[in-house]
Amino acid sequence: MTPNPTVISLFSGALGLDLGLEQAGFEIRAAVECNNQAAQTLRLNRPKLAVIQKRIEMTTTDEILLSANLKVGEPTVVTAGPSCQAFSTAGRRGSIEDPRGTLFREFLRVVRESRPRFFVMENVRGVLSAAVRHRPLKKRGPGFPPLAPEEELGSAFMLILEELKSTGYFVLFDLINAADYGVPQTRERVLFIGSRDGEPVEMPARTHDRNGENTLKPWVTLGEGLLGLRDTRPQHTSFSKSEQKYLSRIPEGGNWRDLPKHSQPRAIGSAYRSWGGRSGFLRRLSWRKPSPSLTTAPDGKATMMCHPDKVRPLSVRQYARIQQFPDHWKFAGGLPQKYRQIGNAVPVGIGKAIGGMLNKTIRENSQIHSLPTIICYNNDLLSRISQRPKTILNPQRMRRIKSREAALKWLEKSNGLRSEILRFSAQNPTQRNRI
């Protein structure tokens, strides 16, 4: 009897990605998770799983392999979703110099030392534009020195690509949307898949489309995703009385913009005069659309996930169903810890789709012995990245020096396009670009 392909899970959390691989026929042999509540969640649901409750920096690869009962070269896949707060566009943004932003190097250390057949790593969309050293917007523009190369947008992503290439693996990356795989949530994530032996790995094939075009199914709505969920005593946090007052006036699928003009400044405070995305303020979800990307706090001021009908956040069980956890899955800790574990997870359906692709690759066993390289699976994404500026400025009204000419002069010294990314375009004919 052929043994199941094996998984070593790093930064395991509540097991979203790995649970999907398990559903595709993989066996999770070991999980490394330092958070106490998340580790307790693993033990509640997988009591026989070897859980190493330590920081990855303090955990040796030998210890991981011993726990998994595997030797160097034997793991089928090592998975990871290194802590992403440093790259996230929500809240204060750090970057690769933030300790949370360097955890991907610990993942690469384990890959180099354990030599799995494949690896899978995911991260937030913000990693595409992350800088090695983040300079706040208020310190850019006329009156400030030009950006150093490590302060330019995208500099951290370029470094990440070079370090992935240094593993000696054949690596693909792409930006995927969970809704394209039947997840009732529009959650965009950067996915990296590596092959030790140069096998022709691909991004998992999409099964859904926003409008159900090209023989694909339409996206799964929130209502469809929660269909049949028994949640008679929902656990959830609460909004403030002020937030409840405004939310009660907002229709399904709306947000603060649906309030009368005169009440909008008071409703969202200083954010009213800021710029950038503000769609998460006083946001009420819609049954007829997929959920927005789940955050770690459904009651957050800028990341509200208000129930479509009720004036409360989505419940823990609704959160878990949107991430496609089984309804019986238990989460340890208090409400904030439960929401955080679920919000940080990779949707189970993404893991299952990746597992299906890897199973196909394993069955075909068609090694191409590609030179160690890293390519983008989607040339359209690569083109978009190459046209992005290496810095942006605050609106003119928010700058220290408001002269347009001074801003253009500063940008001449600090700006440019990230065109060097184009060297990661697909050259191998076995790879199909998804455009």
Image (cartoon, helix red, strand yellow):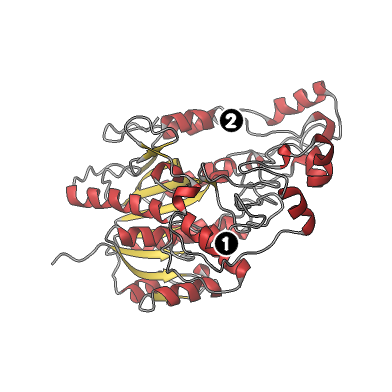
Whether residue 312 is situated above or below residue 59 in the rendered picture:
above
Whether residue 59 is situated above or below residue 159 in the rendered picture:
below
**Residue occupied by mark 2:** 388
Query: Within 10 Å of the Cα at label 1, are there few (<14), some (14-19), or many (20+) other Cα atoms?
Result: many
Residue in the foreground of this view, choosing between 210 and 189 = 210
Q: Report whether 403 appears left or right of 11.
A: right
What secondary structure is marked by label 2?
loop
Give the CA distance from mark 1 to mark 2: 38 Å
Residue in the foreground of this view, choosing between 330 and 271 = 330
Residue 119 position by quadrant: bottom left
Please report the residue visible at 78 percent of the width from the left and 26 percent of the height from the top: 407
Please report the residue visible at 61 percent of the width from the left and 69 percent of the height from the top: 335
Q: Earlier in the sequence, mark 1 or mark 2?
A: 1
Q: Which amino acid does label 2 sit on?
A: Arg
Whether residue 3 is situated above or below residue 252 in the rendered picture:
below
Q: Which amino acid does label 1 sit on?
A: Ser
Observer able to see residue 112: no
- Specify the label residue 281 is tagged with: none
Q: Residue 50: horizontal and vertical position, in percent?
A: 38, 76
Observer able to see residue 312: yes
* Quarter of the figure with the N terminus: bottom left
**Residue occupied by mark 1:** 315
